[in-house]
Image: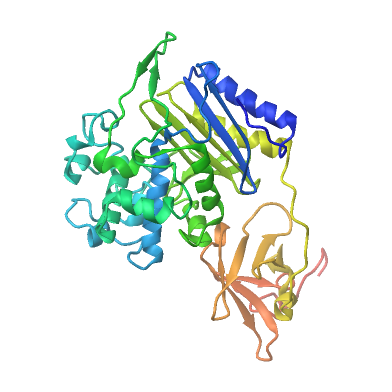
Amino acid sequence: MTSPSEQLLPGTRRALLHRIATAQSEGRAPSLVAAVQRQGQTVWSGSRSYVDGHAPDADTQFRIGSITKTFTAVLVLRLRDEGLLDLDDPLEKHLPGTGVGGVTVHQLLGHSAGLAAESPAPWWERTPGTLRPELADVLGEQPRMHTPGRLHHYSNPGYTLLGALIEKVRGESWAEVLRREILEPLGMHRTSPQPQAPHAGGWAVHPWADAMLPEPTEDLGLMAPAGQLWSTTGDLLRFAAFLAEGDDRVLCEASVEQMREPSAPTEPGAWDSAYGLGVQCARNDGRSLFGHTGSLPGFLAALWISVEDDVTAVVLTNTTSGLVIGDVAADLVKIVAEAEPRIPEPWRPLPEVDTELLALTGPWYWGTRAHILRLTADGGLELQPLRGSGRGARFTAQLDGTWTGLDGYYAGETLRIVRNGDGSVNHLDLGSFVFTREPYDPAAAVPGGVDEGGWRGLRP
């Protein structure tokens, strides 16, 4: 069952349907629903089911597991943006008595706090949350596995702590804060901590036989901020649009951009993936994706966003295992992005030009290596090597006349325009590196000086 759409070509729509049909068939999933968004609009949706003539649609709830963590992270960043906490604050400052209060809020968000991956037995995903009524029951006797800040180690109890932090600062339940601060402003009326009809039932499929077993659906209690939520493809696409561009009613664009910046060292060999603040980041076939995957007994979920391609894909299914759902969602993004590449916006000149900045543009040399400084459309500066790969960055202006690096090697570094006594530019100082208008310009303050004999050939 696929909704008609004139926004994608017939061949693209068939390729999308083929991909989810293959996933549902080969993964032996009881049902599967997927949707693709572009330019803020749903351009395709499709579903498959073992029940003839009855398949889920954009309004059918599935459990989304760890995609819940992204919602929890948004709530924490709202507290930061309101000045109620700092990401570098130790947990103890706001939530005393946990026994792991020395870890920071930032480390908890990015899974670098060194905490255990799971709570103590029994398996929390298949047992009632009432078995773990206190934070101590979630953390166990040995909650810390690694030195905080050293590496990424995924931790579900870490997000329980973040949920408790939200409740402590707000003075309300995590579920109520979530409803008021995210779900209502974004119009996500089909996302909830408990299932609301119509919703799918969770199933386990026997690994060696075409047989199914119902999975229990437990209220996770204190673990809810790590994986409790139920949602639909329609609601998750609304959430994705917010994550891509921000929404001042919930979180500004700069803060959602910060969420997808890698926050901690990745696991050895995981060069193609990282974790931001409540979001997973990945490279798939050269394409940068961010979002989250999720699983709980009976359910798998995936949400991937490609900002560059302006394509989002959501895939939800009601099986415990059997298909790599993150790959399915990534393939849906790839199908649309490659079959119908994003048409760029028309080039337009700047509304006005700062003549002093314009005079800085063009070639600059770090030693003998040529770089180009450009004035960007947003009024910033960008410095990149003229040829090949190398150190480069975008810069944003500061009130004191300096510029701060936004990305790359120079992220956070300061770019200063150093002038002569008459106001003319002598050189650029970038984190102590001197960039001059000519290679080793003798008139500039080149560290170590420039040989008085100047440039020479074979014969002096």
Q: Position of residue 151 (x, y in %)?
A: 38, 46
Q: Position of residue 452 (x, y in %)?
A: 72, 78
Please tell me whether residue 163 is drawn above or below residue 90 in the rendered image.
above
Please tell me whether residue 49 is drawn above or below residue 139 in the rendered image.
above
Q: What sort of colour scheme is used for the picture?
A: rainbow
Tell me: 167 left or right of 370: left
Q: Quadrant of residue 392?
A: bottom right
Q: Position of residue 397 (x, y in %)?
A: 58, 73
Q: Quadrant of residue 346?
A: bottom right
Q: Position of residue 215 (x, y in %)?
A: 33, 22
* Residue occupying the far top of the picture: 209
Please tell me whether residue 235 is drawn above or below residue 375 in the rendered image.
above
Instruction: Out of 442 and 380, give the one closest to the viewer.
Output: 380
Question: What residue is drawn where x is 68% and y is 88%?
Answer: 423
Question: What residue is drawn where x is 53% and y is 60%?
Answer: 253
Question: What residue is drawn where x is 32% and y is 48%?
Answer: 175
Instruction: Out of 154 and 318, give the one closest to the viewer.
Output: 318
Tell me: 173 left or right of 304: left
The C terminus: image quadrant? bottom right
Instruction: Out of 62 and 137, give the one closest to the viewer.
Output: 62
Query: Looking at the image, can residue 142 be seen?
Result: no
